[in-house]
Image (cartoon, rainbow, N blue to C red):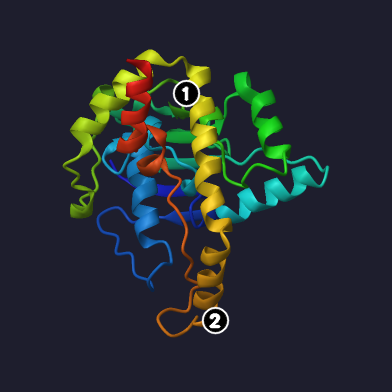
Amino acid sequence: MHIRKIKIEGYKTFRKFELNLNKHLNIIVGDNETGKTTLLEAINLVMSFQLDGRSIQYELNPYIFNSDIVEGYFGAIRNGRYASPPQILIEAYLDDDQSNELGRLRGTNNSVGEDCPGLYLKAELNEDFADDFRAYTSSPGNPSIMPIEYYTVVWRSFADNSIATRNLPFRATIIDTSLIRGYLGPNKYLSRIISECLDPKQQRSLSMAYRKLKDSFIKEAGIQDINNYLEAKKGDVTDKTLTISMDMSTRSTWDTSRLLKNQVLRKIF
């Protein structure tokens, strides 16, 4: 079994991308920051439902959505035009070797309607929260950052069946030593305590308030002056524009902030 084609839409640097793969060996070559690691991440994600060694359900964050698509969406909505909510779609088309192992993954439930075995992963708006999502994105006072609290992740086969990792006839992994994190245990424990005390609506409200607080950081006059200086220095270190900002991914939201969690716990208990 091998992946013969990968399709990626809306994931990080890839607005729309397709790559045919060889059967035995594939070597990905390119300049820095052109998407090599992102491609490997996307393949591992659709094959294992994991990002950075954890379930994508817990690692879903605003920065994995293609920034151009997100910016276009917010611009359209706030100018009174209709636009479909940004989403991520990753499809892995597997080699059609007629084996019984892949037979239950075979179907036409993919973006081109091709009859073959395969898997797809989609991060899309949860329609149960569609009204809340549109209220957030249409408000000029909210930062133009994806409110992932209103999103869900779907992982299915081309036969339109739900996937369980233990039932797949293969395993996928990506080796990256930078993902070793010794603080996960305590953070998971405290996050579980808070999640058991706050209902889902309260958790979403807390995440939104925390994101707005962090967004105000980059609007401070001093930070804007620094970013203007860095923009003027473009080319000295890298051809890309460097900016000072704050991480708004799941690694740095309310449920992973030790200080905030301790404050919440004191209020609760």
Task: Please say whether residue 151 is visible from this viewpoint.
Answer: no
Seen from the viewer's position, the closer of residues 31 and 193 is: 193
Seen from the viewer's position, the closer of residues 89 and 219 is: 219
Quadrant placement of the C terminus: top left
| Residue denoted by label 2 | 232
Quick check: 157 left or right of 110? left
Q: Residue at x 37, y 25 (%)?
A: 264
Rendering coords of residue 215 (x, y %): 54, 49
Question: In the image, what residue type sits under mark 2?
Answer: Ala
| Residue denoted by label 1 | 203
Q: Residue at x 32, y 37 (%)?
A: 259
Q: Quadrant of residue 55?
A: top left
Q: CA distance from mark 1 to mark 2?
A: 40 Å
Q: Residue at x 27, y 22 (%)?
A: 167
SS at circle 1: helix
Q: Residue at x 22, y 36 (%)?
A: 184
Spot the residue most to the right: 80
Question: With respect to residue 220, does 248 lie above or below?
Answer: above
Q: Earlier in the sequence, mark 1 or mark 2?
A: 1
Query: Callout 2: 10 Å neighbours few (<14), some, many (20+)?
Result: few
Rendering coords of residue 14 (x, y %): 51, 55
